[in-house]
Image (cartoon, rainbow, N blue to C red):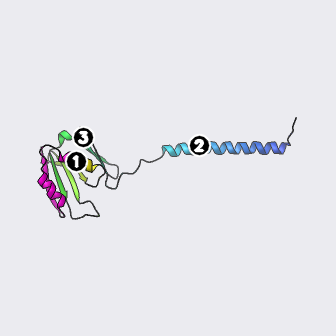
Amino acid sequence: MISFPIEILGIVFLAITIAAAWLIGYLIIQKRSERAQPPPPLPPYGKVHFDDEMITYFRENNEKTSLPWQDLSKLRILTTPDGPFLPDVFWIFESQEEIALKIPSEAEGMAELSDHLTSLSGFQSAPFTKAMGSTEYASFDVWEK
C-alpha cells in the first residue's frame, strides 16, 4: 500500500476545501447577479406599444401612460423649431378635453403607430403633410372622433 506523509494529505485536503469554497461562492454570486440585473434601458425618447385595445407609452424614466382606443377623441400633431437634434414633432392624443398622451415621433415604435394612425377613418392627410414640413411652433388637427 502506498503511504503519503501527513503533510501532503493535509495540503491536498486544504486545496480541495479552498477550491470547493471558491466554487460555491462563485455560483452564489452568479445567481445573485442574474436576479439583480436591472431591466434594459428604454430608448432616449421612450417606447410606444399599441394593440387593438390600447396605446401605451413608456417614458425614458419607466413611467407608463395608457389610453384605450375607445377613449381617443382627438388626434393632433404639435411641432417645434427644436429639430433636428431634439424632438420637434409630437403626437398628441386627447380624450374628453384633456391630453392623455404626448409622444415624440422619435419614440421607439412610433413609426408603426403613425402608420396605423394615418389609416384611421377620417384621418386628414393635408394637415399631416403640413405638420411634417413645419419648423415652427404649430398645432395640426389630423383626426377627430
Helix, strand or loop under label 3: strand
Q: Quadrant of the C terminus?
A: top left
Give whichever of 88, 129 is nearer the camera: 129
> Relative to 128, is 25 above or below?
above
Give the residue pinned by disc 3.
54
Give whichever of 32, 45 is nearer the camera: 45
Q: Where is residue 94 in the image (x, y as percent from the top left)?
A: 17, 48
> Relative to 103, is 21 above or below?
above
Extent of the magenta region? 116-144
CB contact under 8 Å: marks 2 and 1: no
**Residue 98 within the magenta-colored segment of the rendering:** no
Q: Nearer the viewer, mark 1 or mark 3?
A: 1
Instruction: Identify which amino acid the numbered label 3 is placed on.
Output: Met
Helix, strand or loop under label 2: helix
The number of discs equals 3
Give whichever of 91, 24 is nearer the camera: 91
Left or right, 88 with reference to 35: left
Q: Distance between the residues labelled 1 and 3?
A: 16 Å
- Badge 2 local density, few (<14 within 10 Å), some, or many (20+)? few
Q: Position of residue 69 (x, y in %)?
A: 20, 41
View extreme (top): residue = 1
Q: Quadrant of the N terminus?
A: top right
Give the residue pinned by disc 1.
115
Res 86 quadrant in image: bottom left
Of the numbered discs 2 and 1, the one sitting upstream in the chain is 2
Give the residue pinned by disc 2.
27
Instruction: Identify which amino acid the numbered label 2 is placed on.
Output: Leu
